[in-house]
Image (cartoon, rainbow, N blue to C red):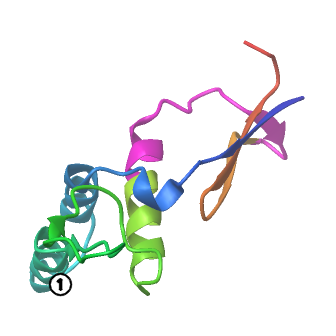
Amino acid sequence: MHLAFIDYEKAFDSFEMWAIGKAKNECRIDSRYRMLIHNIYKKATMTIQLEETTKPIPIERGVRQSDVISPKLFTLALEDIFRAMDWVNMGININGKKLNHLRYADDVVIIASAFE
């Protein structure tokens, strides 16, 4: 058995907004909520203060780490990626079913019976 452990570096910052938007559109979220989330992230900005505060800088990728919905958006986008992958005949056989990956938040384990 071969296991590949993946821990995404800066996971919440790694997704582009278009990928999160695509994932939202492909799931069964009410269109009003999808539009609300879109508008929240579309107008998101940050400022930096060292000696003086900068003008607002648009945030173009990632989700907010302190936001309650951010882990769900991250998981939604990751789910969209995993659905697009071809898992047929991959993984190990457990009671007649193939176990090919495990996921928890931003940690993933890919399971295979051969290194290839």
Tell me if residue 43 comes above or below residue 36 in the rendering: above
Residue placed furthest toward the front: 51
Tell me if residue 88 comes above or below residue 26 in the rendering: above
Front residue (pair 73, 41): 41
User: Residue 32's x, y, as percent?
Assistant: 10, 85
> What is the magenta range?
80-97
**Residue linked to disc 1:** 33
Quadrant of the image containing the N terminus = top right
User: Residue 73's x, y, as percent?
Assistant: 38, 69
- Asked which quadrant contains residue 6, the reply is top right
Residue drawn at 31 percent across, 72 percent down = 48
In the shown orientation, is residue 86 left or right of residue 42?
Answer: right
User: Residue 98's x, y, as percent?
Assistant: 72, 40
Identify the secondary structure beneath mark 1: helix
Residue drawn at 11 percent across, 74 percent down = 43
Tell me if residue 91 comes above or below residue 59 in the rendering: above
Residue placed furthest toward the right: 1
- Asked which quadrant contains residue 26, the reply is bottom left
95 within the magenta span: yes
Tell me if residue 62 comes above or below residue 49 in the rendering: above
Q: Amino acid at mark 1?
A: Tyr
Quadrant of the image containing the C terminus = top right
Front residue (pair 78, 112): 78
Residue drawn at 48 percent across, 44 percent down = 82
Circle 1 Cα neighbour tier, 10 Å, few/some/many (<14 / 14–19 / ≥20): few
Front residue (pair 27, 35): 35
36 within the magenta span: no
